[in-house]
Amino acid sequence: GPALAFEVADADSIAELRHQAEGCTRCDLFRNATQVVFGEGLVKSEIVLVGEQPGDQEDLTGRPFVGPAGRLLDRCLEEAGLDRQRCYVTNAVKHFKFTPRGKRRLHAKPNAGEIRRCAWWLGAELNILQPKLVVALGASALYALLGPNAKLTPERGHILHPTNRPPVLVTIHPSYLLRIRDEQEQHRQRREFVSDLHKAAAFRP
Ligand code: URA
């Protein structure tokens, strides 16, 4: 069945899909980004983690979740008993969107149109991988997976079951934790994030 509410690419393998995506001009984000950052991990992975979009370090290295949010994600996955090596990790949007600020490039949030355009790739990844569970890390991933009606706050920590598609565990994005100033609140949110990831580790279809 269709992996997403949006139109998706057709390919037989992740390698073929990645190759197709390298020339992507489906939205304007390719113009300023260094390269496509495609998903990576085992093709037989039962769990697919979906972030928002590559950040500065991901854009430069071409690999998802290798910067500060990625390192925090790795630690939280480990605490939750999930081995990142056994997951497939990807993003809703495959090019880095930023606004230049001096020498720095500041993350800019992808808009709904960019997410819909890029769901072409995400949906095809899911069609090929057929995971038992997809983890939506934050609102952009949730939008890519379930469209405009799914809301992060009320669904956070829950597993949703769209018809004919893999179930989706809804949680926050790790970079949200990095932005919380209040230390107690940061610890509380981090514990809840680890507990959400633990639900993914314990999930049996
Ligand atoms: N944030 C994301 O959503 N994805 C990455 O790959 C890195 C940071």
Image: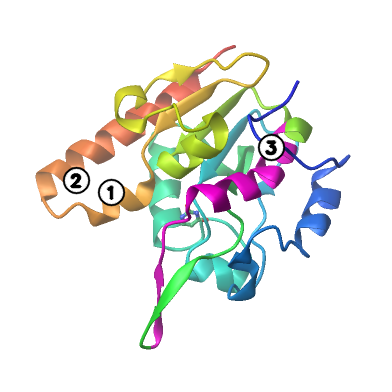
Could you tell me which quadrant the N terminus lies in?
Answer: top right
Task: Tell me the SS state at disc 3.
Answer: helix
* Residue position marked by numbered label 1 in the rendering: 177
Left or right: 10, with 94 as reference point: right
Could you tell me which quadrant the C terminus lies in?
Answer: top right
Residue found at x 38% / y 42%:
76
Hey, which quadrant is residue 84 in on the image?
top right
Mark sitting earlier along the chain (1/3): 3
Q: Position of residue 119 (x, y in %)?
A: 64, 43
Going by the numbered disc 3, the residue's amino acid type is: Gly
Task: Tell me the SS state at disc 2.
Answer: helix
Going by the numbered disc 1, the residue's amino acid type is: Leu
Rounded to the nearest angstrom, the CA distance separating label 2 from label 3 is: 32 Å
User: Is residue 125 one of those drawn in magenta?
Assistant: yes
Residue found at x 77% / y 54%:
18
Q: Position of residue 161 (x, y in %)?
A: 54, 15
Q: Please, is residue 85 above or below residue 164 in the view? A: below
Q: Is residue 44 visible?
A: no
User: Is residue 181 one of those drawn in magenta?
Assistant: no
Q: Please, is residue 199 above or below residue 127 in the view? A: above
Going by the numbered disc 2, the residue's amino acid type is: Gln
Q: Which sits in the foreground, 162 or 40? A: 162
